[in-house]
Image (spheres, grey):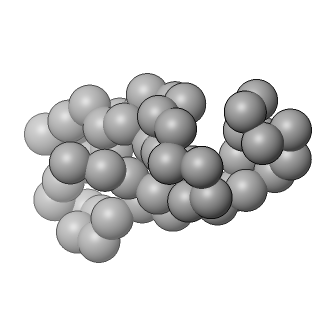
Amino acid sequence: MRVGIILACSDCKQRNYNATRDKKKQTEKLEVKKYCKFCNTHTVHKEIK
């Protein structure tokens, strides 16, 4: 069962990306290093509720 999630920048807290993940296979929250257009750098983006 795949669910839609929103990724937010850990520095500026802006919600930048939408993604999906499998709830059964990946139980912890997703953390990905992506580009933030507000910070103009690559930062860690975390899954929010």
Side of 23 where 31 appears, left or right: right
For image coordinates 46% across by 57% down, the residue present is: 46
Q: Position of residue 35 (x, y in %)?
A: 77, 40
Viewer can see residue 32: no
Q: Position of residue 15 (x, y in %)?
A: 47, 34
Location of residue 2 (image quadrant): top left
Q: Position of residue 33 (x, y in %)?
A: 69, 56
Please state the total of marks drawn on the protein image.
0
Side of 27 where 42 appears, left or right: right
Question: Where is 4 relative to 23, above or below?
Answer: above
Viewer can see residue 49: yes
For image coordinates 43% across by 28% down, the residue present is: 18
Side of 16 where 47 appears, left or right: left
Specify the farthest residue to the bottom.
28
Question: Where is 26 relative to 9, above or below?
Answer: below
Work out which quarter of the rendered image holds the N terminus and state it.
Answer: top left
Question: Where is 5 relative to 27, above or below?
Answer: above
Location of residue 39 (image quadrant): top right
For image coordinates 86% across by 47% down, the residue present is: 41
Specify the farthest residue to the right.
40
Q: Position of residue 26 (x, y in %)?
A: 30, 64
Give whichever of 12, 8 is nearer the camera. Answer: 12
Side of 35 where 8 appears, left or right: left
Give whichever of 25, 12 is nearer the camera. Answer: 12
Give whichever of 33, 38 is nearer the camera. Answer: 38
Question: Where is 29 relative to 35, above or below?
Answer: below
